[in-house]
Amino acid sequence: MSWRQLPLKRLFESSSNGAWGVDPEEPADVVAKCIRGTDFAFNQLRVNLPKAPLRGYTTAEFARRSAVAGDIIIEKSGGGENQPVGRAVLYDGPEPVMPTNFAGRLRPFSSADCRYVTYLLASLYSDGVTRSAIKQTTGIQNLDTEALLSTHVSVPLVEEQRAIADYLDTETARIDALITKKRRMIELLEERHSLAFEAAIGDRGLTFAGDLDHDRVRGTAKPAGWRIPKLSSVLRQLTNGYVGPTRDILRDKGIRYIQGMHLKAGGIDFDRRPFYVENAWHSARPRTTLSTGDVLIVQTGDIGQVAVVPPEFGDANCHALLIARTIPELMYGQFLAAYLQSRIGYFSLIRMATGALHPHLESSIRDVPVVLPPLSAQSAIVHEVADAQHLAAKAIECLDEQLDLLAERRQALITAAVTGELEIPGVAA
């Protein structure tokens, strides 16, 4: 039996806290990359160096606190409910770096394989062992490194540590490659989802290649019966939701009050954070009262997000949204929403935005050009877009579930390997 029980600290020759340093423009003996929590590529258990900022340090400070290849950088402050503090990553870069003041450096003994130790810390983190060493005050989690390093672990000889690390390097690389491929599939499906409207239009002989005008689409003749008028010509009303302070009007129940944050993926996701107003307040503002089929457009913030009001929200009110009501004999609200969510429609809206720092949409969107097919074609396009987007969304959902399973498989493999539960060639049980 080559595995032995020992405190985790017996694997490290030294540990130190990091430092934030000074701006690199200020006088400093050493300028080097500073590794923050955002520079942790925790899925790969490595440091993601390219985006780390440069900071300045004294020679003595840098010598005492910096990390070199083979050191482990551990997050000591920060975290949150869904991502507790205590993540650890291996640094394998060519030049010394400095952990930020919210992190620390652990330097393994030469008698320990740094890759194995990193995998071991990842196992302790995923199994919740690290949580027991967390102290939380004023909403900030702080890792008690001494308490964590007092944790007893079972560790094999260094030759077996290397065999385990070699095995995990190979197997996790295979899983990571599969994860990369599935993420690429999701990207392609998301692109197909976003281009569903253009695809449906293109199938009917009208190709989008850029700007719209009243006569042609980049030199491509319009099919018979199609027009490209301004938005104003297909609307019977364009108005704004209530604009004003909401602190004194919001209630825990009453009439639903839709805000920009509720518009998501072409629909209204009210459950994420419901707001209500009193019926008397609502009744006094018929101009901002919604009706089934209204097209809502976010004016400020995530501008250009669009949703059609479904029947269950037909008596709601709204805040700081553009409310577009189509002329039903000319355009269906669902078709207008599908168009405005398409890339060509979205960029047509964005071109009308005002304000450089805080873009904002106003009633000037009346001049946005829109594609206007016959109603029969609009109906067919809306259904085709909905079907295509539904299929893409279901495929993305399936791939997301597969990614979760692969991540679980990866972590389970690491835990089983570093605890001796998995038979690995060259490693005694």
Image (cartoon, grey):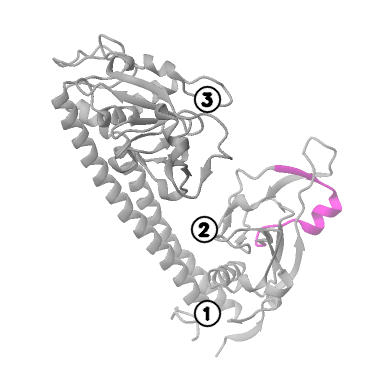
In the rendered view, does 379 fall on the left or right side of 193? left
Q: Residue type at mark 1?
A: Thr
Residue with the mark numbered 2:
44
Q: Position of residue 34 (x, y in %)?
A: 70, 48
Nearest to viewer (mark 3 / mark 2): 3
Q: CA distance from mark 1 to mark 3?
A: 54 Å
Q: Is residue 204 visible?
A: no
Please give the range of residues in magenta.
54-72
- Graded by Cα atoms within 10 Å as few (under 14), some (14 to 19) or many (20 or more), the crowding at tag 2 reads some
Residue 359: mark in rendering: 3
| Location of residue 327 with respect to 258 vertically, above or below | above
Quadrant in which the N terminus appears: bottom right
Q: SS of the residue at dot 2?
A: loop
Q: Earlier in the sequence, mark 1 or mark 3?
A: 3
| Location of residue 85 with respect to 212 vertically, above or below | below
Residue under the point 62% across and 58% down: 79
